[in-house]
Image: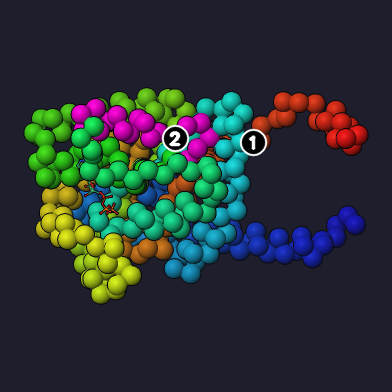
Amino acid sequence: MSGRHTRHDLERTADDDALRDLEKMWHDSPERDLRWHPGLDVHDLDCNSTPGYDGNKGDGEALVAAHAAELDDLQERLFAEGRSGGSRSVLLVLQGLDTAGKGGIVRHVVGLVDPQGVAHRAFGVPTEKEAAKGYLWRIRNALPTPGMIGVFDRSHYEQVLVVRVDELEPEETWRAHYDEINEFEAEVAASGTTIIKVALMVSRDEQKKRLTQRLERPDKYWKYNPADLKARRQFGAYLDAYQELLERTSTDVAPWHVVPADKKWFSRLAVSELLLAALRSLDLGWPPADFDVEEQKRLLAES
Ligand code: ATP
């Protein structure tokens, strides 16, 4: 049999070649291509662009599908590690203006892995109790436990976004949050959590299209919130807030990735690749058996 390929081997080789071709459409790597860096100004960002990526919609969707099995496998390894005394976890922080597509990312990207291993949490206006405890209290309580992938749909960053734009706190108070957040995230990372931060950037025009669609389709009314129009009028102020947030809180242990979000297929591709890269970087194995496998086989056979 040596030197001969089975049909299955040949198919796998063809699949591997196709996968490599799809992967090569990234110039470098999604983590590096999308990472915020000094000089990147969100005011000038083309939200319809696909930075670092040469493929089209079909290629992007094919790559997400081709990587789905690996994503699922790595998530299961992480989960198994957590069940076996490991301390590591992953936290995906999703921020974006209304209609930027956070929900779609959760459904189409996070939905690729076993929901048992995902701790999803959306952060709305804090309750009275939450507000009294300080803005990081509810965040700390929602951090992923070992083995889990935590997903924050909005996060502590609202404290330097809506709080800043709507003047809910005096400037000196919200300004102090940048350093507090950096310290907090350094602590979270040191405890074994890999943090992936994604700013989904939708353009004003695309946002209008998506809001219009919500008003034209009865199956989308539930997504429409008249208050979104207020945030739309504040679009420029939000961009200023995003720019400063990126400048002040993109750190080595918790860097920001800026993802243009006018093309939904691209933002989904980007986030699935960032999640995959984070899981790959953990070099996850399978926990060894903490029992005598041969003995258990024998006992099972005898049972
Ligand atoms: P989304 O647009 O994310 O789907 P939504 O419109 O369904 O959300 P909710 O989930 O009820 O609305 O709440 C989100 C709102 O809560 C946003 O307007 C956000 O700015 C606000 N919010 C979140 N965190 C805070 C905070 N720390 N302080 C004040 N407002 C906050």
The image shows residue 122 at horizontal and vertical percentages of 34, 45
The image shows residue 53 at horizontal and vertical percentages of 42, 59
Does dot 2 land on a helix, a strand or a loop? Answer: loop
What residue is at 39 percent from the left and 58 percent from the top?
104
Q: Is residue 277 visible?
A: no
Is 151 drawn above or below residue 268 in the view shown? above
Amino acid residing under circle 1: Gly
Q: Is residue 99 visible?
A: yes
Q: Which residue is mark 2?
A: 144
Amino acid residing under circle 2: Pro
Front-most of residues 252 and 140: 140
Q: Which mark is residue 285?
A: 1
Q: Which mark is residue 232?
A: none
Q: Are marks 1 and 2 in contact (CB under 8 Å)?
A: no
The reply, left or right, for residue 242 in relation to residue 21 is left
In reply to whether residue 144 is colored magenta, the answer given is yes
Q: Which span is picked out in magenta?
A: 130-149
Front-most of residues 133 and 7: 133
Pair 1/2: label in front:
2
Q: For the residues marked 1 and 2, what is the alpha-carbon distance in whole angstroms? A: 20 Å
**Is the residue indicated by label 2 positioned so its CB lies within 8 Å of ligand 1?**
no
What residue is at 80 percent from the left and 26 percent from the top?
292
User: Which image quadrant for residue 225?
Assistant: bottom left
In reply to whether residue 180 is colored magenta, the answer given is no
What residue is at 30 percent from the left and 25 percent from the top?
183
Q: Dot 2: few (<14), some (14–19), or many (≥20) neighbours within 10 Å?
A: many
